[in-house]
Image: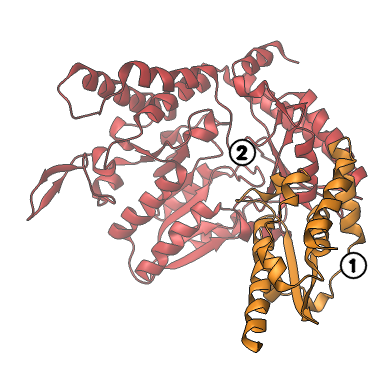
Amino acid sequence: MSIREKQEAITEEFAMFDDWMDKYNYLIELGKELEPLDPRYKTKKYLISGCQSQVWLIARLEDGKMVLQGDSDAVITKGIVGLFIRVYSGETPHDVYADDASFLDHIGIREHLSPTRSNGLVSMLKQIKLYALAFKTRQQKKE
Amino acid sequence: MNKGINNIRNRFPILDQQVNNRPLVYLDNAATTQKPDTVIRAVSRYYETTNSNVHRGVHTLSQNATQAFENSRKAIQHYINAAHGHEIIFTRGTTESINLVAFSFGERYVNAGDEILITGMEHHSNIVPWQMLAERKSAILKVLPVTPAGELRMDKLDSLITNKTRILAVTHVSNALGTINPVREIIQKAHARDVPVLIDGAQAMPHLKVDVQDLDADFYCFSAHKMYGPTGIGALYGKEKYLEEMPPWQGGGEMIQEVSFQKTTYNQLPYKFEAGTPHMGGVAGLEAAISFLASQEEPLFQQTERELLQYATRRLEAIPGLVIYGRAQNKSPVISFLIKDIHPFDAGTILNQLGIAVRTGHHCTQPLMKTLGIPGTLRASFAIYNTKEEIDQLAAGIEQAKKMLL
């Protein structure tokens, strides 16, 4: 499934919910289901500090594809971390870097992305892109 | 609901709206209060009828604007019972007032090796300006500790004031916990050792009737927007004897007497500290906010807020797993709390979906949160227009959040 197709699938899933409560219940469920990050990665090095909740994000390159792992101390944020991982993990750095994360507009959780005092989501997306750029540059050097 | 309070509520147009398809329940008043009709009208009336630059023009509008501006200064002087009008300096708010003193008092009175005493429950705006001063002057910042209940360790005060202490800065009311500090006693103890005291009054002015002479405060700082007035305006009260000695801190128009390229002489108080065109519309709104507060029947006002705090404390305490932080004997209507196993951000997000506005996070008091051993809290803070029904909705919202998140 491409990044685009995964985002469309997520948008469809969220469209099924009639009210906000179901939507948030789903995010909370995703948060609870997300495999917790190994505590040894929950360090300052991997911390993306938003004002409100802590988010850790790590990335590695496997066979030319990015593998993302993440966690948060707030469960709704963790659910959103899970969405990011679902969309971008297993994709090439090139595709990840080029994507505009438009699904966030479509699923109605954009209020999480207010630039200030939010939960670090803007920083999260930025960090994913930075990882992608670093991997992309490394790949280009090898070629 | 108390009929008088119902009438007050009708004077705040912003409260009558839906948020996320629910009636707004605004419980973030310690961050900023909403504005009554008279304040909103005073600001727009200023621009509709009076606007002109103050203290400059010979023309009628400028004279009217100047008169209105100086009347507002007098209204503040009378409201807080300052001895002189020129002891009221208009600033952008509490933060700027503290920065002005830290800079200007610091320039005049603080030298290498001197000590500045603050407390462990200060807002960052009553920490950082003093740290900057300490760094600039190689002075030492000392901190009066806080008890687990969120009260100042008054037993440590005497030993922390030394013959090197140049100023003591303390908040009147804690923004994060609601603790009302015994500032009169603190000032007495400091004065006994010839140490002047700056009071951060941002959270006190909306709830308490402040008399700066009765307190004998040397500096008292506040913001209009936390006391039903407009944003971007506030004041510094300072005793004449200090303000006269302190050098200006910003240069520009209005603060000068005579300017030449060789030497500039400075204007008298209060203009020495008011460089540039001031926030005249805000000053008009601040005067209306003072009138609003002054027109409230004080016992009823305080009783209403006390009842809100008591009712909210009782309702929230009854929720299993909820812990209230800040158990001071003497508290303003603020409740900081956490719910077991729930991140405050998650709970705040669900409450927002229910139309309930609370604050989540460290409330710009990271050192205090560290002392309490928590990353932050949820904070519900009440104003005169809040109702018990809204507190019921908050309690129901917390139950809902628990159901969803646990």
The relative height of residue B189 versus residue B367 in the rendered view (above or below) is above
Q: Quadrant of residue B120?
A: bottom right
Mark 1 Cα within 10 Å, few/some/many (few <14, many 20+)? few
Of residues A52 and A21, the one drawn nearer to the viewer in this rendering: A21
Letter of the chain shown orange in the rendering: A
Q: Is residue B283 visible?
A: yes
Residue B336 horizontal side relative to residue B138, left or right: right
Identified by mark 2, the residue type is Ala
Q: Nearer the viewer, mark 2 or mark 1?
A: 1
Q: Which mark is residue B398?
A: none
Identified by mark 1, the residue type is Glu
Letter of the chain shown red in the rendering: B
Q: Circle 1 is placed at which residue position?
A: A35
Residue B249 horizontal side relative to residue B139, left or right: left
The relative height of residue B256 versus residue B211 in the rendered view (above or below) is below
Q: Circle 2 is placed at which residue position?
A: B30
| Cβ atoms under marks 2 and 1 closer than 8 Å | no
Q: Quadrant of residue B302?
A: top right
Q: Position of residue B200 (x, y in %)?
A: 49, 45
Residue at image coords 40%, 54%: B195
